[in-house]
Image (cartoon, grey):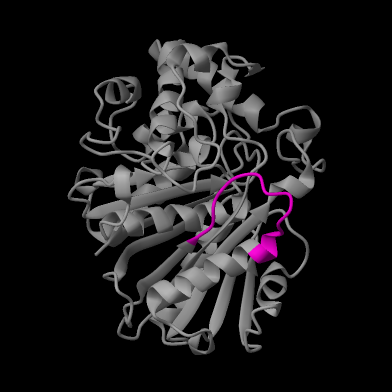
Amino acid sequence: MKQPLITGVGITDFGRFPELTEESMAQAAILDALADAGTQLGEVQAFYCGNALGAMLPGQRALRELHAGGGAVYNVDNACSSGATALNLALQALKVGQYDTVVVFGMDHLSSLGGGPLQLSQKDWNNRRGMIMPALYAMRAKRYMHDHGLALETLADISVKNRKHGALNPIAKFAKLASREEVLASRPVAEPLTLLQCCPAVVDGAAALVLSTRPSRGAAKPVRVLASVVQSGLFETAPVDMTEAEITARAARLAYEQAGIGPEDLSLLEVHDAFTISELLYYEALGLCKRGDAASLLQSGATALGGRVPVNPSGGLIAKGHPPGATGVAQVVEVCEQLQGRAGARQVQGARIGLTQVTGGGIWGVDHAACSINILSL
């Protein structure tokens, strides 16, 4: 079985760009990734496109103006896990020798959809009754606060940390420093969550990766994918613990086994912090700490830049932004740059192994419909 490597990465600014299209942003990210890899467009045998909220045939629409040859284009919609799922599929094809060089990219342009929370399916009975994402995470936060004595101030500190990280990231156009008091005083969204504890609702952006089993011609050292896992959610009819991120814990166990490592071996993580409580739940589901100890881990400084295992050095979804189709790919771009020592002011010193985790899919029981985890190393 062949060993594919990530040989080039590209990413656009993340922000609100109504004058642009998702296709033009994807084109910019793809060309940057190809240049980073030292690869010509004509060498690419297949394209894998993650897109959650665009129109039909997003990959072909993005590639049309690049005159990209007419080879295979695979369009993947797995909600916020779309881009990371596209990566998983590309890796499978490369390992069995179907292709030797491919591009994975993700894109979404939320400016074209207006504001407010993402529209979920009205065919789902949970959604019709108002169970949209902010409501679900507010319930999870309230339950966790009840069970583990979590303070409102600790929830706010996730936002403070990630905004501090995001302020160091030049692509994070929404990133602004905020104090705990400012986070708590921002407009209520769903008790106990305030506006600054939620990822921005309108963000545009794209990210791309070049993967190849050929020798790399890029300037940066290529990155290995030690594990790539995609799992689907369980629709539970019996009562479940909504503070247990079951799908993430299940995917993480598989990823650690595939990579032959444990959570203690990680240098950094990029996780799906769509809301502040999310990151705390994922500390536990990913094995960074025991159940109920997430607040202590955060307060110790371990998950901040300079700490033992920085989480979301990019700023995460809260500070960098969350164009759903692009997020999973963007997380991998961040980890690659960290491992290669190219992360600038937000560089995690001595980074050796990084993990990305992204969920998606609206309400599925009380967790998610999809989860993708990737573990990367030089």
Q: Is residue 20 left or right of residue 142?
A: right
Residue 162, image x and y in percent?
Answer: 42, 32
Viewer-proximal residue, 62 or 224?
Answer: 62
| Callout count | 0
Residue 306, image x and y in percent?
Answer: 22, 35
Q: Residue at x 52, y 13 (%)?
A: 184
Viewport quadrant of the C terminus: bottom left
* Dominant SS in magenta: loop
Instruction: Tell whether position 16 is magenta.
Output: yes
- Which region is colored magenta? 11-24
Instruction: Tell whether position 71 is magenta.
Output: no
The picture quadrant where one finds residue 234 is top right
Q: Residue at x 34, y 45 (%)?
A: 269
Q: Residue at x 25, y 54 (%)?
A: 353
Q: Is residue 2 left or right of residue 124?
A: left
Residue 256, image x and y in percent?
Answer: 29, 53
Viewer-proximal residue, 171 or 340?
Answer: 171
Viewer-proximal residue, 353 or 360?
Answer: 353
Please say whether residue 50 is visible from this viewpoint: no
Q: Is residue 214 above or below residue 307?
A: below
Please say whether residue 118 is visible from this viewpoint: yes
Q: Is residue 297 above or below residue 151?
A: below
